[in-house]
Image: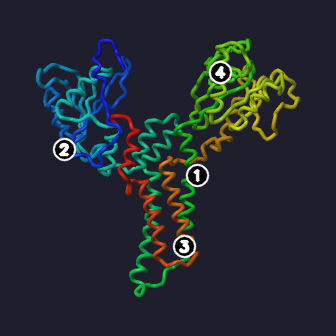
Amino acid sequence: MLFRGIPNHFFQFSYPTPYTLPLMPPSGTTIAAIATAIVPAQGSVGIVRLSGTEAVAIARALFHAPGQQAWDSHRILYGHVRHPQTDQMVDEALLLLMLAPRSYTREDVVEFHCHGGIIPVQQVLQLCLEQGARLAQPGEFTLRAFLNGRLDLTQAESITDLVGARSPQAAQTALAGLQGKLAQPIRQLRATCLDILAEVEARIDFEEDLPPLNEADIQTQLEQLLADVTHFLATAERGELLRTGLKVAIVGRPNVGKSSLLNAWSRSDRAIVTDLPGTTRDVVESQLVVGGIPIQVLDTAGIRDTEDTVEKIGVERSRLAAQNADLVLLTIDAQAGWIEADQVIYDQVKHRPLILVINKIDLINSSAPLPTPDSRLPTVPTAAALNQGINALETAILATVHAGTQAANLDLAINQRQAAALTRAKAALEQVKGTIADRLPLDFWTIDLRSAIQALGEILGEDVTESVLDRIFSRFCIGK
């Protein structure tokens, strides 16, 4: 990133490759980073954050607070950031103090609230580094919060989900995870597994001194555990949709109303609409939210044989967009009906999840049967020029992705890492049931119970490797 008149070194911060974070923060290490997005001439406030044993000392060396302002925890001081050697003023700022353990990381945390833009925050950050702080790795503040017991791993992952949320529903799901609505039931499942393991191991070690194991009760608990794990696994698809969204491609031959459909759906003049075939020459994108799911809609060039070089490139891009889309809206002209050109396009995309959109129904006899190549194909009639059929289209999309209009009214959704751990836990619990049914010795029960406990612990971060932490926190932004 280069800006005229600004030294390049202000933007050149490199990070180790491959990405590696220390499993425990080195004793006495203080980290610093810019904690807000910095855009030239567009930000009113920029924050530089420090965490560690020297955070307050660095702040005292750089920040001059006039009068008798008390440097107490959870107070905001007004003053100026000055160069410690030259006493040159760098910025007029506010200083926020959050002393351990009442801070995000449970370490001493200091924030310089500077004027927004590039230069002030970069200069303040540079001064912090010159005073002995180290530039933070991506996610290192949250990693410290996790390692210091401020957050469990599900809450840490919810933070990055909240930052990256692309819809209100995604944000609410992330907040639910941050509040422990996923961690609490997972912790209870693990506690139940530990109780069962304790009962079994007690019978192994003190068989003669204890009453026989109640196998029926153990079976009941295992059934409930499996039902709960299955319930959580069912939220994985929803979680993936909320986090990554859905890519939808509108395809069809020229002049069937694809661009009109995009404009009506997005309530904007996003795409150029004319009566001339081949008006759309490239893929036009629009970002929407349907039923809480972020959707990237791609209006593509009409697919047909053409000798026009530019249009030919657009047609190839249309075919590629259809191949890479999660869902294809094959759009046809109700007036023309189902013609051979539509069949050619259908043969190319029928292997993809597909909805047939029959546009321009306002121009035909309403009693006429709608053309379709397959009666089992979800079909939505629309009149895009009149903004008709959009609600029905959204309902069909939600039904196709099995999300439901309110995403099944669930307030949590697991991610891929959590789903993988839960799948291992489920397999282990099912193996315990099989072991009991086969009348194998109690020692065999403990093997799979321990596997289930370990898998559930990985979700919470109680049994987790450094490589897993690396993968999780490397996705965080710097300063978080």
Asked which colour scheme the image uses, the reply is: rainbow
Callout 2: SS: loop
Q: Point out which mark residue 28 bears.
A: 2
Residue, disc 4 = 263
Quadrant housing residue 427: bottom right
The residues tagged by marks 4 and 2 sit, at their Cα atoms, a distance apart of: 57 Å
Residue 305 in picture, x, y percent from top left: 74, 19
The residues tagged by marks 2 and 3 sit, at their Cα atoms, a distance apart of: 50 Å
Mark 1 / mark 3, whichever is N-terminal? 1
* Farthest left residue in view: 85
Residue 64 in picture, x, y percent from top left: 15, 27
Q: Point out which mark residue 234 bears.
A: 1
Residue type at numbered disc 1: Ala
| Residue 403 vertical placement versus 315 (above, below) | below
Q: Residues within 10 Å of mark 2 (few under 14, many from 20)?
A: few
Callout 3: SS: helix
| Residue 448 vertical placement versus 289 (above, below) | below
Foreground disc of the pair 4, 2: 2
Quadrant housing residue 252: top right
Say which residue appears at 32% left-offset and 34% top-offset.
Answer: 15
The residues tagged by marks 2 and 1 sit, at their Cα atoms, a distance apart of: 44 Å
Q: Residues within 10 Å of mark 1 (few under 14, many from 20)?
A: some
Residue, disc 3 = 435
Mark 3 / mark 4, whichever is N-terminal? 4
The residues tagged by marks 3 and 4 sit, at their Cα atoms, a distance apart of: 60 Å
Foreground disc of the pair 3, 4: 3
Residue 14 in picture, x, y percent from top left: 31, 31
Q: Residues within 10 Å of mark 4 (few under 14, many from 20)?
A: many
Q: Nearer the viewer, residue 276 or 364?
A: 276
Mark 2 / mark 3, whichever is N-terminal? 2
Callout 4: SS: helix
